Image (cartoon, rainbow, N blue to C red):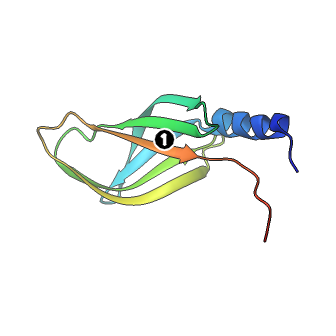
Amino acid sequence: MLTENALEKFRAFVKRNIYRARYRTGSTWREATINQVEIQSGGTVRAWLAINPGGAATVNRVELLDPAGATWAYQDVSISVTAQQTGILYWFDFTIREEEAE
């Protein structure tokens, strides 16, 4: 069994390696602003990011990148943004826990 100390170190590793974010509209990639990455009270690592396409668009993929620029996590989506919206808030949750195999 992993100790709580080990789980905390895994969570800190995830938090430390969420370095950049980007999103795709059509085939065009744009940078997203990471607003905050925190370890919540239940142990979930949550990364909030702002997606601001600057007009009407449909976002079809959101990615988190590590410090080397490699994709670390992604989600294929279909999020429509209207010209009247200033943007959308999107987040990734990572829950790190150990479970015994059955």
Give the percent coordinates (x, y) of residue 9: 78, 35
Residue 90: image location, x then y, percent: 39, 42
Left or right: 83, with 45 as reference point:
left
In percent of width and height, residue 101 lies at 79, 67
Mark 1 closeness class: few <14, some 14–19, many ≥20 residues within 10 Å: many
| Residue that sits furthest to the bottom in the current view | 102
Q: Residue at x 64, y 35 (%)?
A: 15
Q: Is residue 37 left or right of residue 8?
A: left
Q: Quadrant of the C terminus?
A: bottom right
Left or right: 33 in relation to 58: right
Which type of secondary structure does the marked residue at label 1 adopt? strand
Looking at numbered disc 1 in the image, what kind of residue is underneath it?
A: Ala
Q: Residue 29, percent across and down?
A: 39, 50
Between 55 and 95, the one nearer to me in the picture? 95
63 on left or right of 1: left
Q: Nearer the viewer, residue 6 or 31?
A: 6
Does residue 57 lie above or below 10 as drawn? below
Find disc 1 in the rendering and name its residue: 21
Instruction: Classify 62 as above or below 8.
Output: below
Residue under the image location 56 percent in, 52 percent down: 73
Q: How many numbered marks appear?
A: 1
Residue at the extreme front: 102
Residue at the image position 67 percent from the left and 40 percent from the top: 14
Q: In front: 86, or 10?
A: 10
Tell me which residue sits at (59%, 46%) in the image: 94
